[in-house]
Amino acid sequence: MPTIFDELLDRFHGYLGSVDSKLVSDAVARVDWDMHARALEPRLLGCLRHLDRIAEAAPPEIKPLVGFVAEHRNDLHWGQTYTAADFGQAFIDNYGWLEVFGTRGHFVNGEVAAGLLILGPDIVYPDHHHIAEEIYIPLTGGTEWRMGEGGFHVREAGKVIHHASNVNHAMRTGNEPLMALYIWRGGPLAQKSTIAKDSA
Ligand SMILES: [Fe+2]
């Protein structure tokens, strides 16, 4: 019997396979999808209250993944890397991630980490960087993203965003919450991001 975790991985893989991007298809092809499950207790966070709206707002091609996550939220192990000391309590109450696979997620992978990030409405995730290269795909629309010295730009659901190693990036939400799919590779997979000096 497949577990809900197997189905989560299948839906995650299935959505990634539908994304029309060479960057993403190359990343997907390099993952060994025959991963071992890691036994993790459920861990719940305040940001999960945004999941109903996220599932409602996701476009049709993304709903099978996001709707499944919303439905099974209470069985999943949600995480946070930051504390209130980093960006304040409002951020912590509106932020969390689910590592589908990697060094600490539901499936074991020492080469690539991937999962889903949640940010509530009206949240700024300030400039930060990390060694790993990162691919993001927002699964809901209307959030603003910036990288390097550039300004903020609205990125719609399904748009592929690439952050090279050690380049500062930031995002901010408006009146809707965000769910974004992330893939990390080429660096320490559980590293806490370094916060840019003038944004902490
Ligand atoms: Fe990042």
Image (cartoon, rainbow, N blue to C red):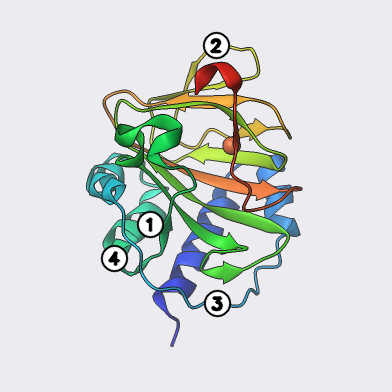
Pointers 4 and 3 in contact (C-beta within 8 Å): no
**Mark 2 or mark 3, which has the lower sequence index?**
3
Viewer-proximal residue among 28 and 134: 134
Q: Secondary structure at mark 2?
A: loop
Question: Which of the two marks, 1 or 4, is nearer to us in this view?
Answer: 4
Badge 4 amino acid: Asn
Residue receiving disc 3:
37
Whether residue 66 sits left or right of residue 53 in the image: it is right
Real-space Cα distance between discs 1 and 3?
A: 21 Å
Q: Secondary structure at mark 3?
A: loop
**Mark 1 or mark 2, which has the lower sequence index?**
1
Can I make out residue 92 in this image? yes
**Coordinates of residue 70 in the picture (x, y in percent):** 30, 56
Q: Residues within 10 Å of mark 3 (few under 14, many from 20)?
A: some
Question: Which of the two marks, 1 or 3, is nearer to us in this view?
Answer: 3
Q: Name which residue lies at 28% across and 65% down.
A: 74
Real-space Cα distance between discs 1 and 4?
A: 17 Å
Residue receiving disc 4:
74
Question: Which of the two marks, 1 or 2, is nearer to us in this view?
Answer: 2
Badge 3 amino acid: Ala
Q: Is residue 158 above or below residue 78?
A: above
Q: Name which residue lies at 60% across and 23% down.
A: 196
Viewer-proximal residue among 81 and 52: 81
**Mark 1 or mark 4, which has the lower sequence index?**
1
- Ligand 1 location (quadrant): top right
Q: Is residue 24 above or below residue 147?
A: below
Residue receiving disc 1:
64
**Mark 4 or mark 3, which has the lower sequence index?**
3
